[in-house]
Image: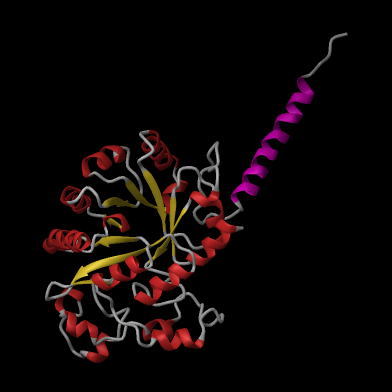
Amino acid sequence: MEINTSTPCRNIVPLIIVAIFAAYILLSGGNNNVNPIMENNNRMTESELTNIAHRGARSIAPENTLIAARKAYEAGANMWETDVQFTKDRHLVLIHDETLVRTTDVESVYPNRNSYAVRDFTLDQIKKLDAGSWFLDSDPFDRIDQGKVTQSEIDEMEEAKVPTLREGLKLTRRLDWKVNLEIKPVGSSAGLIVKNVVGLVEEMNMEDNVVISSFDHSLVKTAAELNPEISTALLVEEPEPDILESMRETGAETLNVAGSALEEARAIENLRELKAAGDKYTVNVYTVNEQDALKRLVRYPLVDGVFTDFPGRLTSILES
């Protein structure tokens, strides 16, 4: 007797497609926030992921202050990330924005200035500023409102100052920790900033504790040439097809890439090519805060580290 299988096959195929789609939704968590294209193999152990505190634990403390750095260390971060700029008198300070307006009380202390750019203030002037009260007033991540910050911590934040790079490095060394220093491409002075940063790192014998990164890849190359013992990283929003060549030309061994790039098949292919070129290349993703997104990334094989404003949240996931 001849068995007719055509009809059952037509019925089964749609069911298989539905099952595959349902499985994908389950694995991805149904969240489009940094939803990486799934790889065939997971990371062997979640503990391999590097927990990088973005501007310190800035969800519970004023960003780029020593308080935020200490809170990140206490939260279990493997390193913290901060931004380096010049003052008017060529001191290196840790602050993200080009101006002092958002994260200090500069407009109250120095009213009616034509410029509030960091580069237009001396270190002594900047040290007179309050770099913590803005955080208490704005509560940017609603952590104070949620009771995640104690009264004693609030009192400490009222005394926060903009730290110098030397102060940040001293804290990092005392904690036997690591720091990623991002150099902003701020015109003609950026190259001198790199030279001064490298010089200070060498003076303090902290080559093993520091990573230097920038969106300006010429600055990364300069840092690598000045001292190959200091790790360097390229910052990009999305890895281009020639990213491997860029890594080789600049001497960088780490690529810091936006989390949104993991949603693009082309970017994923470029990352695969980079990782296939050798174990020395690592990939970190910035800046991821949502719990579900962090859970997906901790076992994503192309990712070696994650920048987050919530290092404690990532530590809990890694230890669960």
Up-down relation of residue 259 to residue 44 (above or below): below
Locate residue 295 relative to residue 55 in the image: left or right. right
Instruction: Where is residue 38? Give x, y as percent.
Output: 54, 42
Image quadrant where one finds the N terminus: top right
In the depicted view, which residue is nearer to us: 136 or 11?
136
The region drawn magenta spans: 6-28
- Classify residue 16 as left or right of residue 177: right
Q: Position of residue 175 (x, y in %)?
A: 38, 67
Q: Main secondary structure of the magenta part?
A: helix
x then y, percent, for residue 191: 14, 58
Please tell me in which quadrant of the rendered image residue 132 appears: bottom left
Does the image show residue 185?
Answer: yes
Lateral position of residue 111 relative to residue 69, left or right:
left
Q: Nearer the viewer, residue 61 or 296?
A: 61
Residue at image x 30%, y 51%? 233
Q: Is residue 103 above or below residue 50?
A: below
Q: Is residue 298 visible?
A: no
Q: Quadrant of residue 94?
A: bottom left
Is residue 21 rendered magenta in the image?
Answer: yes
Residue 110 placement (x, y as % from top left): 20, 89
**Quadrant into which the C terminus falls:** bottom right
